[in-house]
């Protein structure tokens, strides 16, 4: 899937199911500067090279040990992943679970129209929140 994106990728965020060396290796081969934000499993242990040449996964484990789970989530901005999931849930609920167009160019147009509809609806109905001190 990473080879379908023509430009550079700044970061890859996924859930813990993708925590594994093959995923990290694939991302680093195709996009070496991309930040990988995947939470390690609860049973994860640092690799043998964690002290000398830490991998992104080792750095995540170290950060979780230092700051705790919530501190890690805040430090790496892991909450953005849930925003993406919520956006997809809104799209699927309001627009539909599948595309109706048959060819790729018309599917792209259909998806773009669906996104535009969601953006207009969100702009009209989102509350404006202000923090009270």
Image (cartoon, grey):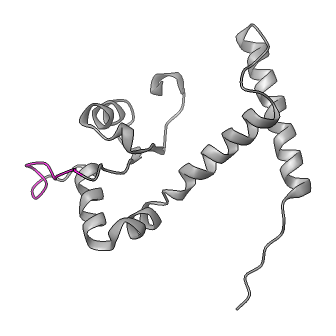
Image-based side of 7 in relation to 133, left or right: left
Residue 104 in which image quadrant: top right
Q: State the image coordinates of residue 76 (x, y, percent, origin top left).
A: 43, 60
Label the magenta part by its dominant secondary structure: loop
Residue pictured at 56% horizontal, 54% vertical: 80
Residue pictured at 27% horizontal, 38% vertical: 20
Residue 61 in which image quadrant: bottom left
Q: State the residue in front, 89 or 73.
A: 89
Image-based side of 40 in relation to 75, left or right: left
Taking the magenta stretch, the answer to whether it contains residue 11 is no
Taking the magenta stretch, the answer to whether it contains residue 48 is yes
Q: State the image coordinates of residue 38 (x, y, percent, origin top left).
A: 38, 47
Q: State the residue in front, 77 or 2.
A: 77
Q: Which residues are magenta?
A: 43-52
Residue pictured at 49% horizontal, 60% vertical: 77
Q: State the image coordinates of residue 98 (x, y, percent, origin top left).
A: 72, 21
Q: State the image coordinates of residue 11 (x, y, percent, origin top left).
A: 46, 45
On-image quarter of the C terminus: bottom right
Residue pictured at 36% horizontal, 51% vertical: 39
Image-based side of 67 in relation to 13, left or right: left
- Check the image and report above or below for 110 versus 83: above
Q: State the residue in front, 16 or 26.
A: 16
Q: State the residue in front, 9 or 99.
A: 99
Image-based side of 107 in relation to 81, left or right: right
Farthest residue to the bottom: give it.
133
Farthest residue to the right: give it.
124
């Amino acid at each position: 899937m990473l080879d379908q994106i023509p430009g550079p990728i700044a970061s890859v965020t996924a859930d813990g199911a993708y925590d594994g060396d093959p995923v990290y290796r694939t991302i680093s081969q195709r996009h070496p500067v991309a930040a990988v934000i995947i939470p390690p499993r609860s049973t994860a242990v640092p690799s043998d090279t964690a002290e000398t040449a830490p991998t992104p996964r080792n750095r995540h484990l170290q950060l979780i040990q230092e700051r705790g789970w919530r501190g890690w989530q805040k430090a790496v901005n892991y909450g953005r992943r849930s925003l993406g999931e919520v956006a997809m849930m809104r799209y699927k609920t309001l627009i539909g679970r599948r595309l109706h167009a048959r060819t790729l160019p018309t599917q792209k147009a259909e998806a773009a129209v669906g996104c535009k509809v969601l953006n207009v609806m969100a702009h009209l109905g989102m509350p404006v929140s202000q923090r009270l001190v």
